[in-house]
Image: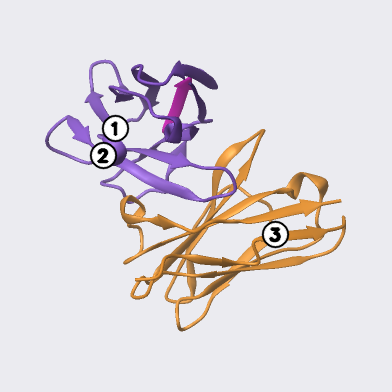
Chain colours: A purple, B orange
């Protein structure tokens, strides 16, 4: 069965510092991988997704993630944190070319300190 | 193009009551999925509807049900509410069934059970 582990329920960074949110997945078949962001009292917004092809995926708001099959990882990064990046971030996996329901990690709350 | 809309945004009920939540998908999207988000269990898939039929179901008791109308709008119902049903209920729509990699999420309905 597919699963997602997000290391660190809370990450705190200074404004302008590197953002690194970790995600490891378990899947018996090639996965589709996603990162979503959730602001308070809002739904989920897709940041980026990996389906096939290039393993480095660029998303919105300057975020990117790299699919590493050997490490079963899909970590999210952003070179320079902005105050507006403070939110909850969820990693998710789907199998069979995105035809299975998303399985989410527990989420990582990102705080940005001025 | 309008996004996914959910009504109501907030709801307070008492144990034993039942509740109905509504979701209107993006225009042209024919599939609607529902997810439950709680602090303890995280984000979990409830079910997916397409063509007025449930085509996929998560691991939830029968108290949780849904339906879809001919215009693709969907409702979910929870009967005999329990305290543990307090959650944010998210609806997501996609153009076609099983396209979980193409889902767009609504803002959610926050249900509080007292």
Q: Does the magenta-highlighted stretch encompass residue A103?
A: no
Which chain does the numbered disc 3 sit on? B
Q: Are marks 1 and 2 in contact (CB under 8 Å)?
A: yes
Farthest left residue in view:
A53
Write the start and end of the magenta stretch as one range.
A2-7
Give the class, few, some or many, for how many residues have Cα within 10 Å of label 2's Cα (few <14, many ≥20): some
Residue A31: tell me if it is visible. no
Whether discs 3 and 2 lie on one chain: the answer is no
> What residue appears at the point 50 percent right and 75 percent down from the top-left corner?
B73
Whether marks 1 and 2 lie on the same chain: yes
Q: Residue at x 57, y 56 (%)?
A: B108
Tag 3 residue: B10
The residue wearing badge 2 is A59
A88 and B49: which one is in front? Answer: A88
Q: Is residue A57 left or right of residue A88?
A: left
Q: Is residue A48 above or below residue B67?
A: above
Residue designated by label 1: A63
Q: Is residue A3 magenta?
A: yes
Give the alpha-carbon distance from disc 1 to disc 3, as whole Å. 31 Å
Query: Which residue lies at the image location 35% right of the left edge and 30% below the top edge?
Result: A27
Chain of the residue that carries numbered disc 1 in the rendered image: A
């Amino acid at each position: 069965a597919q699963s997602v582990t997000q290391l660190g329920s809370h990450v705190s960074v200074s404004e302008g510092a590197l953002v690194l949110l970790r995600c490891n997945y378990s899947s018996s078949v090639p996965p589709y991988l996603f990162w979503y962001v959730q602001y308070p009292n809002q739904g989920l917004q897709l940041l980026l997704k990996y389906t096939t092809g290039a393993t480095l995926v660029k998303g919105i708001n300057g975020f990117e993630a790299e699919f590493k099959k050997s490490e079963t990882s899909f970590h999210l990064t952003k070179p320079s944190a902005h105050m507006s990046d403070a939110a909850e971030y969820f990693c998710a996996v789907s199998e069979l070319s995105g035809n299975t329901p998303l399985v989410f990690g527990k989420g990582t709350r990102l705080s940005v300190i001025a | 193009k309008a996004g996914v809309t959910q009504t109501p945004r907030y709801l307070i009920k008492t144990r034993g009551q039942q509740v109905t939540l509504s979701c209107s998908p993006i225009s042209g999207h024919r599939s609607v999925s529902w997810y439950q988000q709680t602090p303890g269990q995280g984000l979990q898939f409830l079910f997916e509807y397409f063509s007025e039929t449930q085509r996929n179901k998560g691991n939830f008791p029968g108290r949780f049900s849904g339906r879809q109308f001919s215009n693709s709008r969907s409702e979910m119902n929870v009967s005999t509410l329990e305290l543990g049903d307090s959650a944010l209920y998210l609806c997501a729509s996609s153009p076609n069934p099983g396209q979980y990699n193409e889902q767009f999420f609504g803002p959610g309905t926050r249900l509080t059970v007292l």
